[in-house]
Image (cartoon, grey):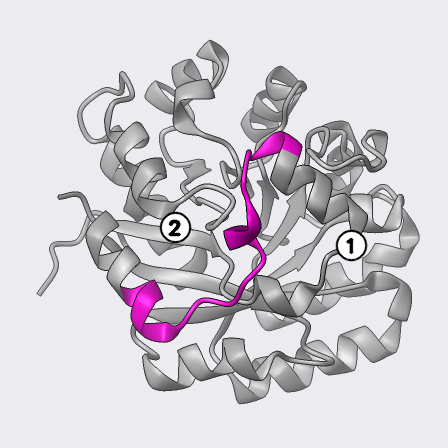
Amino acid sequence: MPRVIDAWVNVNMAELGRPDYLVQVAKNYFKQGEDFFRNYSIEETLKRMDEAGVERAILTTDPGRPSEHVLAFAEAHPERFFLGAQLDPRRGMKAIRALEAFHREHRVVLARITPFYLDIPPNDAVYYPVYAKCIELDLPITINTGIPGPPAPGECQHPMHLDKVCLHFPELKLCMAHGADPWWSVAIRLMLKYPRLHLMTSAYLPKYFPPELLQFMNTRGRDKILFASDHPAIPMKRCVEEAVRLDLRPGVLERFLHGNAARFLFDEDPDQPQS
């Protein structure tokens, strides 16, 4: 069984309520039923992780109003569960101070922003304080790219909006999330251009990866692509099983499932043997 780091796992779906966009994406996009809208226990999540070979999972919460349910996972098993901070840059310095405090008090390994929630592209100046703070904290950040599954604004998630972000914030550790469909070629070209820009395949089944992404993974992008399931939207085990079936060159699967996230999120050297 391969070693896996899952960089996007949801355990508190019941706490998110049932907004129309979430109901529609669950039903029409991921073909999920009522089981989608519930919280998952620590024991059940660990079982699913073990079945899929997932050693570590990143759970997300709002640092200004953190979920006690999510925090309980990281407190009970700090070696398995790590935290991501979902930010709204429109909150200005309130968001920055909340991120600072959350990072100080918990094992936070990344920040997240989802542009379609805001309909504001990530090259807007409202994002800049977040980028500066992430550089100061040496904290990676994920920005959703590609047309979103829910009926929500899509143009704001065009990867090209990250061009000037990478140009003006060259120290920022930035990862495109949820793939980049239909703009895969643009995303790949940007990753070739900017050393610190990566892509996470969360919410995207490996069997649907386009040929240009697989070609990139097998060549110049072998260190650039991170695995993530977006469980329960895509069950962890199914996502890993489909990843294993990909036509990848020797060593690429291991980097995709584990090594790239180990380096990008945890500052570990994936080429060093484990003790």
- Residue positioned most to the left: 275
Whether residue 33 appears in magenta in the rendering, the answer is yes
**Could you say which quadrant of the image residue 250 lies in?**
top left
Q: Nearer the viewer, residue 77 or 268?
A: 77
- Residue 15, image x, y percentages: 64, 70
Q: Is residue 6 left or right of residue 27?
A: left
Q: Is residue 86 left or right of residue 247?
A: right
- Other residues around mark 1 within 10 Å, as few (<14) / some (14–19) / many (≥20): few
- Residue 245, image x, y percentages: 25, 23
Whether residue 10 appears in magenta in the rendering, the answer is no
**Contact (CB < 8 A) between labels 1 and 2?**
no
**Could you say which quadrant of the image residue 78 lies in?**
bottom left
Residue drawn 85% across the image and 35% down it? 153
Residue drawn 36% across the image and 37% down it? 239
Tag in front: 1 or 2: 1
In this rendering, is residue 270 above or below 198? below
- Other residues around mark 2 within 10 Å, as few (<14) / some (14–19) / many (≥20): many
Residue 19 is tagged as: 1
Residue 261 is tagged as: 2
Q: Quadrant of the N terminus?
A: top left
Image: magenta residue range: 28-46
Residue 267 visible in this rendered orientation of the protein: no
Residue drawn 57% across the image and 32% down it? 179
Tell me which amino acid carries mark 1: Pro
